[in-house]
Image (cartoon, rainbow, N blue to C red):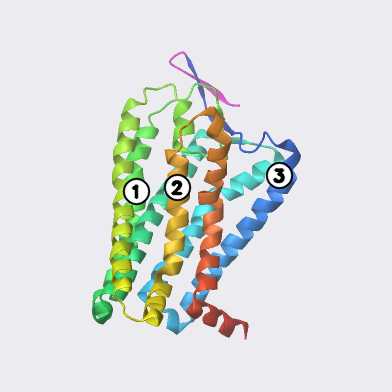
């Protein structure tokens, strides 16, 4: 571990990500499991992007946003899993403070971007079901680009503010982070600086960053469900619901696991459970998204059949 003296304080320059080090007998098995998950996630999301680009029938707002989501999921899982795989394979769990900051920034920015993208996708489904006659006019190419670009830019810009405050922190030890990636709370606990300001800033940003797109998503689906229930025929209701069911499953899984992780009490008895739920929304959700969309979507399955033929 590298140490530096600063104002008579010993400042650490490396963290130790404990990860799953308390399960030494399962390191090889965990490595193989996470390696398979990473390969399936990356290949599945890249396949969806390729299908959307190649098939003219998928050049619609819904699939444009899905392509953005698949690109995001590939980046999202690549910020965490490669480092975890290296530590499981070599046993080296050290990560520099700057590397930890970089991982945290990418992870939080992509998670925030996903919240906005899911909200944009829910608005697209709202217009398609609640205002079908105006869909082509409302969801034009310009608006889709603005919504997608706004999602990416908002996610990354908001987190810059937090990183400006985090860069002022110093860490004097201990250096062990009881997690498999650099998350906010475990890092903050190791700081020997005054963390009251950054705690307040992070609370304000989190209050603006996650609830707003979540409420937009919920509002869209309340309107969608109300419209579907007013459709007289059963076939019509099923057809309308099928166009948004995949997205609804993805939203439920993402927000369900995210809220469970960050709303669970931070007690020692729940640490292991917290880590398990973190695996769900950081590792398993990006893998499930392409599977959900490909298995439940006739147009994606048809495009895949064409490629296979």
Q: Which residue is located at x 29 percent, y 57 percent? A: 216
Q: Gap in Å between the C-alphas at discs 2 and 3?
A: 28 Å
Q: Quadrant of the N terminus?
A: top right
**Badge 1: few (under 14), some or many (20 or more) residues near its Cα, within 10 Å?**
some
Residue 14 is one of the magenta-drawn residues: no
Residues drawn in magenta: 1-8
Label 2 belongs to which residue?
Answer: 258
Q: Are marks 1 and 2 in contact (CB under 8 Å)?
A: yes
Q: Earlier in the sequence, mark 1 or mark 2?
A: 1
Q: Where residue 70 appears, x then y in whole percent? A: 48, 64
Using the image, determine if residue 171 lies above or below residue 33.
above
Distance of mark 3 from mark 1, alpha carbons?
Answer: 35 Å
> In which quadrant of the rendered view does residue 243 lie?
bottom left
Q: Earlier in the sequence, mark 3 or mark 1?
A: 3
Q: Is residue 64 left or right of residue 28?
A: left
Of the numbered discs in the image, which one, if any, rests on residue 210? 1
């Amino acid at each position: 571990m590298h140490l530096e003296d600063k104002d008579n304080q010993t400042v650490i320059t490396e963290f130790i990500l404990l990860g799953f080090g308390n399960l030494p007998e399962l390191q090889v098995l965990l490595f193989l499991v996470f390696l398979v998950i990473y390969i399936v996630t990356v290949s599945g999301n890249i396949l969806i992007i390729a299908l959307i680009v190649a098939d003219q029938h998928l050049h619609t707002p819904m699939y444009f946003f899905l392509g953005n989501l698949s690109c995001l999921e590939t980046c999202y899982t690549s910020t965490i899993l490669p480092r975890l795989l290296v530590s499981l394979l070599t046993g080296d769990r050290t990560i520099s403070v700057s590397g930890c900051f970089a991982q945290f920034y990418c992870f939080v920015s992509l998670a925030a971007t996903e919240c906005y993208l899911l909200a944009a996708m829910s608005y697209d489904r709202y217009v398609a079901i609640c205002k079908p006659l105006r869909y082509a006019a409302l969801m034009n190419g310009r608006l889709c680009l603005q919504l997608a670009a706004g999602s990416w830019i908002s996610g990354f810009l908001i987190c810059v503010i937090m990183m400006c405050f985090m860069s002022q922190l110093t860490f004097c030890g201990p250096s062990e982070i009881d997690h498999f990636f650099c998350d906010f709370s475990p890092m903050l606990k190791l700081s020997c600086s005054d963390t009251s300001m950054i705690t307040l800033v992070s609370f304000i940003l989190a209050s603006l960053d996650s609830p707003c797109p979540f409420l937009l998503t919920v509002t869209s689906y309340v309107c969608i469900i109300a419209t579907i229930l007013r459709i007289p025929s059963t076939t019509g209701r099923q057809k309308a619901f099928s166009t948004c069911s995949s997205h609804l499953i993805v939203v439920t899984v993402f927000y369900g696991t995210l809220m469970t992780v960050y709303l669970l009490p931070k007690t020692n008895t729940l640490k292991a459970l917290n880590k398990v739920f973190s695996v769900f929304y950081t590792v398993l959700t990006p893998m499930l998204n392409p599977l959900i969309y490909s298995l439940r979507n006739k147009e994606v399955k048809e495009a895949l059949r064409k490629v296979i033929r």
